């Protein structure tokens, strides 16, 4: 529910993280503290959704796992999409995805709203199951939300290499979800450009192609 609401709010232009974290952040931090205590006692950790679960395992490269989208757009036939990808990739390494989020945009854009929300649900459900089944260690280390993907996966779980591998797999899954929607949007844009040669794309001033 949390992942769905966060991405749904973002997709209509409202900062979902800031809106909901005021209510859930204390709960997630308490979960993390109890996981730390359990590890110290040599007992099984009780909580999967401890602080860092969503920011690291679900938001791969930013809310909605948009790092996967940026990698797809880097190979786009549309020059504007490739440019947005180049501008956003450096920040998405540190989990900041506003350049691609507002550059495409994803806000109120049906081509990207659907996979944006779907990725959050997919990664939440799959990661939860893997942790609940004991295949990946649960979060018990407090790491900054800007920690790069894969590295963050590894550190959050106290050095579980399986979590790092899952970080790579998660990125691949995000790309699979975004791919058909990105290609459909690309075809639409190229078709529109072909029928209207004079149409232009607004990009930040002073940025070289």
Image (spheres, rainbow, N blue to C red):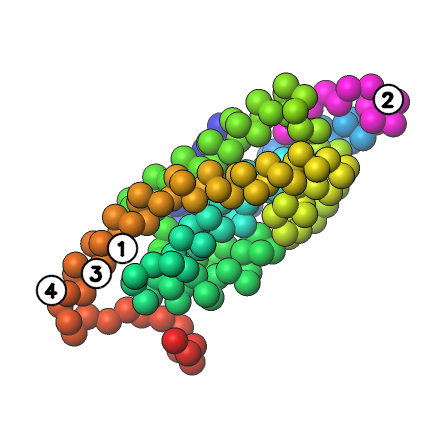
Q: Residues within 10 Å of mark 3 (few under 14, many from 20)?
A: some
Residue position marked by numbered label 1 in the rendering: 186
Residue 199, visible in the rendered structure: yes
- In the drawing, does residue 144 fall left or right of residue 102? right
Q: Residues within 10 Å of mark 4 (few under 14, many from 20)?
A: few
State yes or no: discs 3 and 2 in contact (Cβ < 8 Å): no
Return the x and y of residue 77 as percentages of the image width and height. Answer: 30, 61
- In the drawing, does residue 207 fall left or right of residue 58? left
Counting residues from the N terminus, which is met first, the one under dot 4 or under dot 1? Answer: 1
Q: Residues within 10 Å of mark 2 (few under 14, many from 20)?
A: few
Q: Quadrant of residue 76?
A: bottom left
Position above or below: 202 against 42: below
Counting residues from the N terminus, which is met first, the one under dot 2 or under dot 4? Answer: 2
Label 4 to label 1: alpha-carbon separation? 14 Å
Return the x and y of residue 110 as percentages of the image width and height. Answer: 29, 44
Q: Quadrant of residue 139?
A: top right
Bounds of the magenta span? 37-52
The label shown at residue 195 is: 4
Residue position marked by numbered label 3 in the rendering: 190
Residue position marked by numbered label 2 in the rendering: 42
């Amino acid at each position: 529910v949390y992942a769905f609401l966060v991405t749904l709010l973002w997709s209509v232009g409202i900062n979902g993280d800031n809106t909901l974290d005021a209510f859930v952040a204390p709960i997630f931090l308490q979960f993390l503290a109890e996981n730390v205590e359990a590890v110290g006692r040599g007992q099984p950790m009780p909580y999967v959704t401890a602080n860092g679960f969503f920011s690291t395992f679900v938001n791969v490269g930013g809310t909605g796992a948009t790092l996967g989208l940026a990698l797809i757009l880097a190979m786009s036939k549309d020059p504007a999409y490739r440019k947005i990808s180049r501008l956003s990739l450096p920040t998405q390494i540190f989990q900041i995805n506003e350049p691609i989020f507002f550059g495409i945009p994803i806000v109120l854009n049906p081509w990207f709203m659907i996979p944006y929300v779907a990725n959050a649900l997919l990664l939440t459900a799959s990661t939860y199951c893997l942790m609940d089944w004991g295949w990946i260690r649960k979060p018990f280390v407090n790491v900054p939300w800007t920690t790069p993907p894969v590295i963050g996966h590894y550190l959050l779980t106290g050095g579980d290499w399986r979590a790092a591998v899952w970080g790579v797999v998660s990125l691949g899954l995000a790309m699979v979800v975004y791919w058909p929607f990105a290609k459909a949007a690309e075809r639409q844009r190229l078709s529109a450009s072909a029928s209207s040669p004079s149409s232009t794309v607004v990009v930040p001033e002073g940025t070289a192609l």
